[in-house]
Image (cartoon, rainbow, N blue to C red):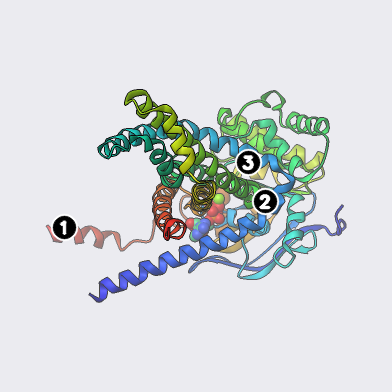
Amino acid sequence: MMDWLQRLGHSSLGVFERLGRGNLFLLRVLAAVPSLVLRPRLVIAQLYSVGVLSMTLILISGLNVGMVLGLQGYNTLVDFGAEESLGQVVALSLVRELGPVVAALLFAGRAGSALTAEIGLMKATEQLSGMEMMAVDPVKRVIAPRFLAGIFSMPLLAAIFSAVGVLGGFFVGVGLLGVDSGAFWSQMQAKVDLQDDILNGVIKSLVFGWVAAWIAVYEGYDAVPTTEGVSRATTRTVVHTAFAVLGLDFILTALMFGND
Amino acid sequence: MSLNNDDPLIVKIRGVKFTYGVRTIFDNVDIDIPRGKITAIMGPSGTGKTTLLRLIGGQLRPDAGSIEVDGQNVHAVSRDALFQLRKRMSLLFQTGALFTDLTVFENVAFPLREHTRLPESMIRDLVLMKLQAVGLRGARDLLPAELSGGMARRVALARAIALDPMMIMYDEPFTGQDPITVGVIMQLIRMLNDTLGLTSIIVSHDVHELTMICDRMYMIAEGKVMGHGSPEEMKGSASGWVRQFMGGLPDGPVPFHYPAPDYAEDLLAGASRT
Ligand SMILES: Nc1ncnc2c1ncn2[C@@H]1O[C@H](COP(=O)(O)OP(=O)(O)O)[C@@H](O)[C@H]1O
Ligand SMILES: [Mg+2]
């Protein structure tokens, strides 16, 4: 029993220590962000690579999720004779929840893990150390651009996911199951609110982007500089991001949509 | 350029102590690096040669003592001043530490792009000059993954001289290279040192190569300086350590055997168990 308590105490101390170091690291990264105003090309290059990494995955998954939503939504709605509302159901599910959340999970699996591995390997092969010895701060030159690219790309990826998803729902609902096309779009337009739904969705994906990018660059920078250390850090990025995103999603949803 | 150009010593290490956890790596070490010369620092693997270079470069902090580079105490100056100092000293990592996502050309251009505002045409000329000096102007479009180990070190060398430093530190430049490459690198180190008026520090355990190329040698082991002098003085040294290392003798102050219980007892203990 004592033993168990001791281990519990030990591991929670470890968690707090990591959190503390992660926060200090975040402060360093944020302090480096202003210097990027003069060198936007560093961020743009990273946006491009993060975008390219994730785009195919986002497109295919968005389409699939939208099609499934169309099918399941129709089956439920048709019992109440409300299949006209399919557009609304598909769009709201995507914009409020599935777009930000699934895009963030996919981002962690594809771009986040790649960022961690890249930074971890740069550390293991002394590229970061070499940069420091060349009087270049790797946090400014390597970490901050990747962090910003992660934050900026997330709302875009989530928006693309939702847009493709709506199309997928449309194909299934209107194309295959015979829902009226005009009703599909007009219901959607009437019931999806710019502020309540779209803006909140964007805020969610900004928060998720922040967290996912932070975890990815921190795990890479903090990785034990060996092959095994980098592979473990990569796994941690995916797992921690998934937990963080799902947990935060519940809190954000409660705050945004809890009392209406 | 340099504030203390007339000081014959470019690096002064005084009473430096350094530990990793409970392990003492350096215990009260004094080292002088003369300006304009090639100084070798020898020692068995794991004595802390790389650590020493990182201490000089300000990446690690000694527990006691001081390290002065060109008149400035590396660990007492501001971060900005340290970065200014680092622009004037290059550290050539054992692995080369080239940026794997950049071509040879961009690797050499990196310090120029980061620290100068030169126009592109000037950067191109400078990069080609540096690559020419190491014989790799033709390899400018290759990626680091396409280079042999020896070529990678030469590219790293071209990058190290991009900003015309006053001093270059080489971490094990010969290790794992074929004899021809070793010859090429030795010649490059000497040539760059003399034509560019550099100071060179070579950290290595390749005694034979070092005695051919360096002006002064330091031998470190067990956290202490075991001897120093010109290569000739070192060969004739009275120290058992220095003689064992210089001659490559298998046994001496550095024992062949890892500490173990008595051999006969160890064997008998196994016999009595069955
Ligand atoms: N980050 C570190 N933490 C703990 N011990 C280290 C670390 N880096 C190196 N060491 C230990 O310090 C000793 C000296 O390392 P190093 O300077 O790399 O030796 P050398 O370059 O002479 O082979 C080695 O025994 C190594 O195991
Ligand atoms: Mg070493």
Residue wearing tag 2:
A133
Q: Secondary structure at mark 3?
A: helix
* Chain at numbered mark 3: B
User: Please, which chain is the residue tagged with disc 2 on?
Assistant: A
Q: Is residue A113 left or right of residue A6?
A: right
Q: In the rendering, at what x and y percent does residue A197 appear?
A: 49, 48
Q: Give the residue displayed 54% in from the left and 38% down from the top.
A: A50
Q: Are marks 3 and 2 on the same chain?
A: no
Q: Is B25 on the left or on the right of A33, as rendered? A: left
Q: Quadrant of residue B76?
A: bottom right
Q: CA distance from mark 3 to mark 2?
A: 26 Å
Task: Choose mark 1 or mark 2, whichever is in front.
Answer: 2
Which residue is the site of mark 3? B209
In this figure, which residue is indicated by the disc labeled 1?
A: B271
Contact (Cβ within 8 Å) of mark 3 with mark 1: no
For the residues marked 1 and 2, what is the alpha-carbon distance in whole angstroms?
56 Å
Relative to A14, does residue B112 appear above or below in the rendering? above
The reply, left or right, for residue A89 in relation to residue B242 is left
